[in-house]
Image: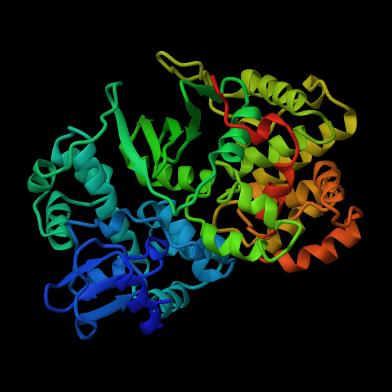
Amino acid sequence: MHTDTEGCLRAVQSKDARFDGWFFTAVLTTRIYCRPSCPVVPPKPANMRFYPSAAAAQQAGFRACKRCRPDASPGSPQWDERADLVARAMRLIADGVVDREGVPGLAGRLGYSTRQIERQLLAELGAGPLALARAQRAQTARLLVETSGLPMAEVAFAAGFASIRTFNETVREVFALSPTELRQRARPGPRAAVPGTLALRLPFRQPLNPDNLFGHLAATAVPGVEEWRDGAYRRTLRLPYGHGIVALSPRPDHIDCRLALTDLRDLAGAIARCRRMLDLDADPEAVDGLLRADPQLAPLVDKAPGRRVPRTADADEFALRAVLGQQVSTAAARTHAGRLVRAHGDEIDDPGGGLTHLFPSVDALAHLDPESLAMPRTRRATLTGVIAALAAGTLQLGVGSDREEARAQLAALPGIGPWTVECVAMRALGDPDAFLPTDLGLRRAAAGLGLPATPAALIRHSARWRPWRAYAVQYLWATDDHPINHLPTN
């Protein structure tokens, strides 16, 4: 969007928060870059330049605005919507791959040369993978400086910097303040009551309807791994350097996030996983605007706009849970998953909470005895087949995976039908156009609204909902009085 100068000018002059994260505005006279909704008086158009990423603005010599804090804006919805190389690279960078494995590691995961990735990112975002990762490190450092009492040396290494000197130089360059000054001027805000827990605010684009989002996560929660407690969805996270526990609570203008990590180097990746799980980078205006064009869906959208797609913090975990949930009730699926967790999951401590385990890793399940599973023999074979494929790497469901290739890999496994493929595509791969035409609840809702009820006819009709069919599914499911559609009250 940054190349549409007139559109960017209108967004800045109207302080339109819908475009926060889509582009960044740099001011030549002050050498500051802002989000479009910055509350200050807009500069003269001749003094504005527009950049596609914070990293590009930083590389051009601009520093972040202290008023609107552009580094804390929602991410661009393009990276969830799109499935091309740049989008896959951006999802992996957000997950911390460049910090852990370098640019060669990023290239290896994507199956391209480092030169090709550098070229495409630079052409579209004005910055290469190292600069994009550097901007993310600066954001992580600011969070740790402002929300924790950690010594600055610990903050530096937890944020991914190789040295304290680089940390100090980057913070000064991006925020025009030293780390100590940044901590001193931090806005007073909520602090976590539990020592060692970080209290964060996760932004999103308005509107956001939390009912089906948190209702789905709470209603399908695996005992020991997930729970709803004191108005928050809580779950354990398996992360590259250790594990964590997160508590997420909906607020009118943000998601309250409380994170406890065994290794603070996992902070950026944990935040990225929480944002993906809650679909916080979505563009509800674009989604709802298109779905309203269908007369049958318009009343549902107008009644409760801003529905998100409940996703997952771990794609491999969700694939296994999808198999466990085939042709059984939500309660039965939770029971099966809970047994698997108790038998094979790593135990963790959760003072004051009810979380007891991490969901079992693929490696821990690689030698699972199928006879120990209390389910039909065919589903046992399907589950062990998915585990074997994930362990061998012939099934890849990570954030950087090619969605169509992953669909084909899933469909090739015995016992995996179209419903499971599309369910995994929707919630694990994050495909906004995933669609479940054979789902009984969806077909029942369609028939009640006068939409075609047979799978083939429903697929034809759904063409008008593309590329947001996964969101149409949420609106259709919401017509049923099922626990997944209601925000828990206890």
Query: Quick check: can you spot residue 236?
Result: yes
Quarter of the image that includes the N terminus? bottom left
In the displayed orientation, state which residue is furthest to the top.
352
With respect to residue 118, does 323 lie above or below? above
Can you tell which quarter of the image residue 4 is in?
Answer: bottom left
Identify which residue is drawn at 19% across, 68% down. 41
Residues 126 and 389: in front is 126
In the displayed orientation, state which residue is furthest to the bottom.
46
Query: Quick check: can you spot residue 396?
Result: no
Residue 212 horizontal side relative to residue 44, left or right: right
Tally of numbered tags? 0
Residue 184 image point, x, y percent: 9, 41
With respect to residue 101, does 143 lie above or below? above
Residues 113 and 167: in front is 167
Residue 38 image point, x, y percent: 26, 62
Identify which residue is drawn at 59% across, 29% down. 218
Residue 215 image point, x, y percent: 60, 33
Residues 267 and 277: in front is 277
Colour approach in the figure: rainbow
Can you tell which quarter of the image residue 169 is in?
Answer: bottom left
Identify which residue is drawn at 54% across, 40% down. 210
Residue 309 horizontal side relative to residue 170, left or right: right
Residues 315 and 370: in front is 315
Residue 139 horizontal side relative to residue 169, left or right: right
With respect to residue 444, does 360 lie above or below? above
Can you tell which quarter of the image residue 47 is in?
Answer: bottom left
Identify which residue is drawn at 31% across, 53% down. 72
Residue 437 image point, x, y percent: 83, 53
Quarter of the image that includes the C terminus? top right
With respect to residue 159, does 104 lie above or below? below
